[in-house]
Amino acid sequence: MERSAAGASYQRFPRVRIRELKDEYAKFELKDTDASMANALRRVMIAEVPTVAIDLVEIESNSSVLNDEFLAHRLGLIPLTSSAAMSMRFSRDCDACDGDGSCEYCSVEFHLSNSNPVERIREPKEVLHDAVDPPSQDLRFQQVTTYGAKGILIVKLRRGQELRLRAIARKGIGKDHAKWSPAATVTFMYEPDICINQELMETLTLEEKQSWVESSPTKVFDIDPVTQQVTIVDPEAYTYDDEVIKKAEAMGKPGLVEINAKEDSFVFTVETTGAITAYELIMNAITVLRQKLDAVRLQDDDGDLGELGAHLIGG
């Protein structure tokens, strides 16, 4: 009975509440869980959600100022539309092409052919990311996302220069190479729990209250112009710097404010590279995390945990 009760205390049923959601940005709360789950979700979003990126480049003609290696590197870092990446196969696991990574199930082929005619007397011609198109006109990989006003610059061609190449894009994850990472940044913070001792605060003058409020590097507190009470305007702006606590102690008012981190509540901020939307990134990360847990559960059921299982059994 005691063992059952102890086991129940480790059960977690996380809840998510979306605060803000755009194509390439999301902010959400993850509650009723702990830091291990929050960090696992963050690491999966950064390094294990698959996308499609250019992995092989065959240069047919290049008379531009950039050498072939530079061009291949720049092409690899261009975010490609990867909404269909989850349904594709990894080239190493593809049985249709024996792992060559050259079939429709695990790759997509792009061509680029551009030149700046000798007759052109203007500025150098800019070759942008939208010049790279899949010859098959596969709608899954049409580059419809706009990056800034002009797009991603690959190279500039002067008069008489030409660039022709063939590129193969494959499915991969950020753990293998950063070009496959769909996340520009993923951060989370503990949600702060701030409690002001209003009785002790009322012993301060208005000038002392103002001085205490201004001691915070970020706009966490403010003074109500009507009641002249100190209020909390943005608790999540708090950076756990303890400046207001130090200020209260310097004023001879320890315990003026109590600030604790909620260990079961986290605020995530997610920005994508544009390869997939923020919503797809979050949902795909949860799918990948579930697949990992299912794999561990199956190994546990089969009693095949390898060295880890032997270690656990042996104590």
Image (tube, grey):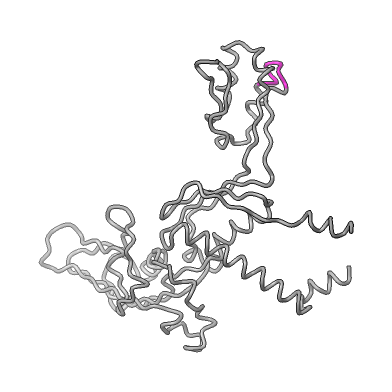
Whether residue 38 is situated above or below residue 71 in the rendered picture = above
Q: Position of residue 130 (x, y in %)?
A: 29, 65
Which quarter of the picture shows residue 194?
top right
The foreground one among 220 and 58 is 220
Looking at the rendered structure, the number of numbered marks drawn on it comes to 0
Q: Position of residue 63 (x, y in %)?
A: 26, 71
The foreground one among 271 and 266 is 266
Q: Residue visible at 64% across and 14% down?
A: 202
Q: Residue visible at 29% across and 78% down?
A: 135
Q: Quadrant of the C terminus?
A: bottom right
Q: Is 116 on the left-hand or right-hand side of 23?
A: left
Whether residue 43 is situated above or below residue 303 in the rendered picture = above
The span picked out in magenta is 248-254
Q: Position of residue 307 (x, y in %)?
A: 79, 74
Magenta stretch: includes residue 203:
no
Magenta stretch: includes residue 249:
yes
Which quarter of the picture shows residue 204?
top right
Q: Position of residue 184 (x, y in %)?
A: 47, 55
Q: Residue visible at 55% across and 22% down?
A: 214
Q: Quadrant of the N terminus?
A: bottom right
The foreground one among 96 and 58 is 96
Residue farthest to the left? 119
Q: Is 3 on the left-hand or right-hand side of 258?
A: right
Which quarter of the picture shows residue 45?
bottom right
